[in-house]
Every structure is written in structure tokens, then in C-alpha cells.
Amino acid sequence: QAKENGANNYIRYSKEITGHVLNRLELENDLRDALTNHSIMVYYQPKYNSQSNRMIGAEALARWQHPKYGYIPPNIFIRIAEESQLIIELEREIIKIVFGQIRRWLDEGNQVPRTSINLSSVQFYRDDLIPFLQEALEIYQISSEYIEFELTESIILKDRINVNERFDELIDMGFELSIDDFGTGYSSLSYLHKLAINRLKIDKSFIDDYHENGEVIATIISLAKQLKLNVIAEGVETKDQIDFLSDLSCYDIQGYYFSPPLPVSEYERKLQTLRLSNL
Ligand code: C2E
Ligand code: MG
Ligand code: MG
Ligand code: MG
């Protein structure tokens, strides 16, 4: 499997995927087509608690199988979508897919853990976000308690005056909110206590080199504790990382150690075992 994360790989991938030289404009047009054809898919990466070994949630991640070039990493097509406003339609598509799948899983009698969806700052600040979400909840008949939104620090860096207002609106609707890739945004920590958020996600880059970043990780975890926020580590791949995080009382884990992002059919099998284990 290709390594698609990391700024270094981005450049290489933006030029070449499995031998193809990619044209940005061509990709943008193909992405527009993919949205029209509803061929964008969602994979689900389970989140676990390392003490109980139980699934505690999942993250919905966009997947695009290009008709000619095959798998295009999200880091590439999300960037293109953000630069071209296609991100608005793409995220709406993801929201509809996830809400629809949760409805179906519930109808089939499954226990469904809270599922997080990534939201760009463009979407976050749109006037029609709240009405869109209200309508989607209505159409798919699901409760907002099943949904969490992951936002990056760039939302706050935009320094928009209505940032708190928007957080409050989403929380009032019953959604959970987390700050994704936390610690990478170079933002001041002073805004954090003002925001209605539930969770910090420690960025994978810290976990990758946890030996060097031990103090940063410890600081984030104690900050979360002081602010009474939950904390989850992302990109956890090894038992050593689990042990390190356990020593700091961080047990919520997302990463290949427990599971990679799964296609719907495989994720459904996990949901079914979840049901069996609770009988
Ligand atoms: P993210 O939101 O931080 O998602 C976590 C990324 O880390 C995912 O990459 C996931 O596959 C990867 N990951 C999780 N655990 C591990 C691990 O143990 N090892 C390694 N090597 N990787 C791990 P993915 O799916 O390639 O997505 C990359 C980014 O693309 C996401 O980062 C998110 O920023 C963006 N993205 C994906 N789907 C959407 C979407 O629907 N909307 C928006 N706005 N962004 C999205
Ligand atoms: Mg995320
Ligand atoms: Mg993240
Ligand atoms: Mg990340």
C-alpha cells in the first residue's frame, strides 16, 4: 500500500501516481464527474479503547478510485477540492452517505458507534451548513448523537469572529466536535477553553516519533485533562506507542495497530461482531 501521508510524499504524488503524470485540471474535472456519478466512497476506520479493547467510534474517510489512475490519496484530491470549491459538494456527499449508511445499519439491528466526519473550514463557515445538517438528519432519520465533526485548527486561525457561535450551534444540535491533527496548527492554546469542543485528536506526526515528542504529547494530554476534554491519539501503529500513551492515561486510539480504514463490507462485519459481543 502506498504511503500517502506526509508533506514530502505530497509533491511526489502530485506529479506521479503509478507512473502517470497527473494534470491538476484534469483531476479537478474528473473529481467533478465523480461527484456527479456518486462514485466517491467512504471507508470507516474504527477507533478503540486500549484498556477494554472495544470499538468506541469510527472515522469516515473519503475514497476515490479514479477510472484511469486508480486510487488517489485524499491528501491530493481533498486539496484539489478545497482549491476549487468542489469541497462543498464533496463533503455534503460524504455526509449523506454516512447518514444513509448509519440509518441502514440501525435498521438492520446493529449497534452503531459514533462516527466522525471531517469538515473543511469552507464548509464550517457556510451560512447553509446548519440548515443542510438539519435537513439531512430529517431525511435519514438519525439522531445527531451518532455524529462527530472533526475540524482542524485552521478554522480558528481564520480568526473569524463567529467561530464560537458556529461551535455552539453545532453542539446545540447535539453533534460532538473534535479538533483534528491537534498540535500542528501553531495556534495559541488560549482560545481552546472558549470553544465548545469535546475532544482533541493528537496528530499522527507526534505519535510517529513519540520518543522525540514525548513532552509535547504529555502536554497535550494534560491540557485536555485540565479543560475536561477527551483526547484520542491517531496514527498509532505499535504496541510500544500504546504502552507509552497508556502511561499518560491516553487510552482512546485510532490507528493501524487496531485497524486501517475499512471498506463498508468489512466494517459491517465489525459492526455485527459488536452486536454479538453484547448479547
Ligand atoms: P485525517 O482526518 O487526519 O485522517 C486520518 C488519516 O490518517 C487517514 O488518512 C487515515 O487513513 C490515516 N491513518 C490512520 N491511522 C493510521 C496509521 O496507523 N498509520 C498511517 N500511516 N496512517 C493512518 P487518509 O484516509 O489518507 O486521509 C488523509 C486526510 O484527508 C485526512 O486526515 C483528512 O484531513 C482528509 N480527508 C479524508 N476524507 C475527508 C473528507 O471527507 N473531508 C475532508 N475535509 N477531509 C478529508
Ligand atoms: Mg480526521
Ligand atoms: Mg487527523
Ligand atoms: Mg492527519
Image: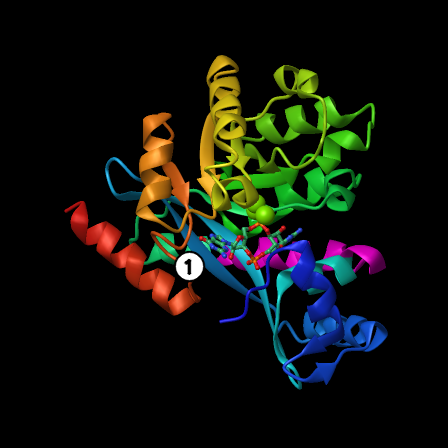
- Is residue 251 visible to us here? no
Main secondary structure along the magenta-highlighted residues: helix
Asked if the magenta segment contains residue 169, the reply would be: no
Closer to the camera, 175 or 182?
A: 182
Q: Would you place residue 194 above or below residue 120 in this image? A: above
User: Dot 1 surroundings within 10 Å: few (below 14), some, or many (20 or more)?
Assistant: some
Q: Which residue is mark 1?
A: 260
Task: Where is residue 26? Give x, y as percent.
Answer: 81, 78
Q: Quadrant of ligand 1?
A: bottom right
Closer to the camera, 77 or 169?
A: 77
- Mark 1, ligand 1, within 8 Å: the answer is yes
Secondary element at image label 1 = loop
Which amino acid is tagged 1? Answer: Pro
* Total count of labels: 1
Task: Where is residue 140? Give x, y as percent.
Answer: 52, 52
Q: Residue 163 lies in what quarter of the image?
A: top right
Q: Would you place residue 83 above or below residue 146 in this image? A: below
73 relative position to 79: left or right: left
Task: Where is residue 43? Give x, y as percent.
Answer: 49, 62
- Is residue 227 visible to us here? yes
Q: Residue 38 lies in what quarter of the image?
A: bottom right
- Look at 39% across and 51% down and name the residue there: 237
Asked if the magenta segment contains residue 84, the reply would be: yes
Q: Over which residues does the magenta segment extend?
A: 82-100
